[in-house]
Structure formats: structure tokens, C-alpha cells
Amino acid sequence: MPNEIVTSKSNTGSLPPFSGGDALDITVANVRDLFPIAARRAYLNNAAISPVSQPVLQAVDSFLHDVRDNGDKSYSGWCVYADTDIKSRVGRLIGADAAEIAFVKNTTEGLVTVANGLDWKEGDNLLLPEIEYPSNVLCWKQLARRGVTIKWIKARDGRIDIADISAAIDARTRLVSVSAVQFSNGFRQDLVNLSDLCVSRGLLLNVDAIQQVGSMALNLGEIHIDFLSFGGHKWLLAPIGTGIFYCNRKSLDFLVPPNVGYHSFDHGDCISNDLDFRPNAGRFEEALVNFPGIWGLDAAVRMHLAVGQRRTEAHILDLTDYAAERLRSHGWTIKSPRDGRERSGLLSFGRTGINAEETALHLRAQGIDIAVQTDRLRISPSLYNNRDDIDRLVAALPIAHNSFGEG
């Protein structure tokens, strides 16, 4: 079978999570079969925590079986395979080189690496949208003790206008930090024009991409972004506790690793204490990485590569477009931007007289999983979802005043 997991008997550790290399017979049409949850629930909350597929589970198991049977016998093989094969595949997914990629535990770790690694001067400032997720807020607020201030960019109907970012730049502005897709309403930032603005004004651009990678196509080879972070547990459909920090090779020397350890350096042994950092983004991996989770992340990345980013994006946008149409026809108000490239895989909606929390609890009891953001309901269908999941959601929603029945 194309997604069968095999375990190596050699001292190089577990083989890649799929036998047969990268040529996987996985498509939009059959990927649903790899997710056991799809047979039981209409899981539409992938912007929170996604379920994992059978190949991801098997990949994690294959690694742990290797450790069970061999201890650290394969350690050097794991390191080489993670740094070369897995990082190369992640690079193919986002349009980056393996040398620009570091493994992290989550998006927050990548954001904190930037916040604490830059050489800030008292009086510097950065630009930050007022609607960001806390992970892209708290690490910057911490910089107040170093005399760094935040200039907040106000949202206009849930959108962040690049003209407003441009107008806020002054002589002490060092960096702009944004989410590629806003968690609350699904607004997708125009990263191309924002990148052009930052380059023209000599600013660093930092991106929280957890709500984009795995749902909307991204090619870092086409735009200049200095730093970008994303966790694996949402749209990437990878294990919790895995993530990627991207550092553009041209921006590597702007950051001093805030956390350092033996893995940050190119030593042949564990004796030297010289601070000769690895010549790539690997310098931001201070110690042993989460190999079991990374093996699972690799399985998820292989699945995304097999389907293709553009096909994945088209499928997810079709589902949110279909959902928006069906919800409007049943009296719901769509709260997410739906114009052109502003739309994404997140769709927020509401209705007068409906209690969002009670509605979400009712839906969960009916085998339908969604999220609540303030007073709104939010769905986030992924690669394995289909229109039947949307129909099931609409049918179970309340008609009015929390009277549940056929919608």
C-alpha cells in the first residue's frame, strides 16, 4: 500500500514514514479515508487542533518502536535524516531551503525567538495589528522593559490595511509582525504587498503563519519574509508539539539565538564551549528535538505534497464558499471577509438571538465540532472534509432563539 509504514532494521533509524518515497497515491478524493475521525464526526475545527491521520500515527509509532528496540543506536541517523530529508520536504512545502528551517515546539517559540533575538535599542518600536492572537502580542509586550514600544494598527471591519501600516512607520520602527491569516475572522493578509512595503522602508517582516500553512498556498521563494513561524497541530495535520521556524538566509545574522545549547553549534563532540553557531537556521535548535513528533510532521508534509498546495487551497475555499452560501440561505450572517484573496479557510458567522457557546455545545453533542470566537461561530474545514460535513452542520444549527432542529 502507498501509505504503509516500514521500520528499518539498520542502524540509520526508522525509514521515511511512507514506503515508496515521495510518490504517494493520495489525492483530495481519497485523503479522507486516512482520517478515522471523518467516519464518526463532522470535524470542522482544524484552526484549533486537527485530528491526525493514520500515516501520521504510524510514523510516530515507527520511530518509538525504533527507540524501544535500539535505544540511541540510531541517533546520528535521526539527526541527518531530520536535517536533510525532512527539512528539504518542509522547504518544498513553503518554498524555502532546508538551511532556512529550524524545528520548534510551536508557533510561539518561533515568535519568541525573534522578539528576544533581535538587538533592540531603547526607543525602537514595532507595528502590530490590534486583532492578533496573544502569541503574537505577549512576546512583544515583554520588550517594554527594554524600552521598545508597540504601535498598534487598527482593524477596519476585521481587515488590516497596508496603507495604515505604511502610515504608522517612523524613523524608529524596526519590524512589522502580522498573522498571515487572522484567527478570529479568517482575514488573509496581502503578504506580497506588505513584503514590498517592508523592503522599501528597510523594515524586518515577521509572520505568524499557523493559520495559512496547510490550508492556503505559500511560496517564500516569491516574497521576502525575514522570519516566519507555524505549528504543526492545526492545518498541517501534524502532531501537537511540532512546529517550524523559518529564518531567511539573508536575515540570519539579525538574530542572536536567545536559547543556546550543544545543538546550536557545529562541534564534533560535547567538550568544546566555543560560540561558533551552526551556519544555518539549525542554530535555533538548542538541544534534542522532538523526533517522534517530527517523524509525524514529516508524514503530514508528505501527504500535503502529494495532494499539492494549490489543490488543497482550492478544495478548502470551495468548502468555505459553499458553507457561506448555505448559511446565508438559512438566515446566518457571515462575519469573515469573502472578497478575492482576503478569504481563507476560516469562516465566522452569527445570528441575532443565538447563543454561540450553547450552539457549539449542542453541535458537539450531535457529532459536529466547531469553535466560538467572542459571540461568533467559526468553522475551519480542512483537506479531508467534504460538502457532506457542511450539510450536516447546517442541518443541525438552530433555526432561531436556540430552538434546535432542521436548519
Image (tube, rainbow, N blue to C red):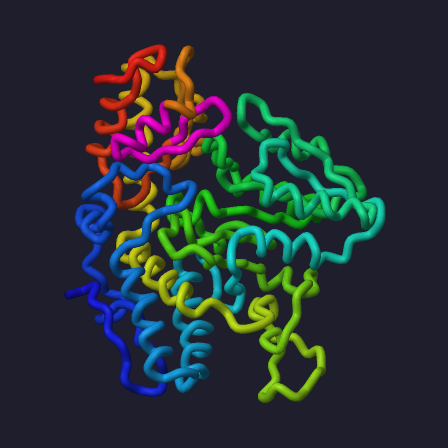
Q: Residue at x 51, y 55 (%)?
A: 106
- Hey, which quadrant is residue 44 in on the image? top left
Left or right? Give the position of 133 relative to 318. right
Question: Is 82 situated left or right of 321 in this image?
Answer: right
The answer, for residue 135, to whether it is visible in the render is: yes
> What x and y, as percent, mark residue 14?
32, 77
Badge count:
0
Residue 372 within the segment the image draws in magenta: yes
State left or right for residue 178 relative to residue 377.
right
Residue 169 horizontal/vertical position (percent):
73, 37
- Quadrant that contains the C terminus: top left
Above or below: residue 341 compared with residue 105: above
Instruction: Judge whether 25 appears above or below 316 on screen.
Output: below
Residue 280 in sight in this render: no
Range of residues picked out in magenta: 359-378
As rendered, which of 272 and 198 lies closer to the eye? Answer: 272
For the residue pair 119 and 62, the one nearer the viewer reads as 62
Question: Residue 260 appears at what percent x and percent y?
Answer: 66, 70
Which quarter of the picture shows residue 11?
bottom left
Q: Residue at x 22, y 27 (%)?
A: 391
- Residue 369 % position (x, y): 33, 35
Closer to the camera, 102 or 94? 102
Look at the image and tell me in which quarter the N terminus lies. Answer: bottom left
Determine whether, in the image, residue 267 is placed left or right of residue 214.
right
Q: Residue at x 23, y 44 (%)?
A: 38
Q: Is residue 194 magenta?
A: no
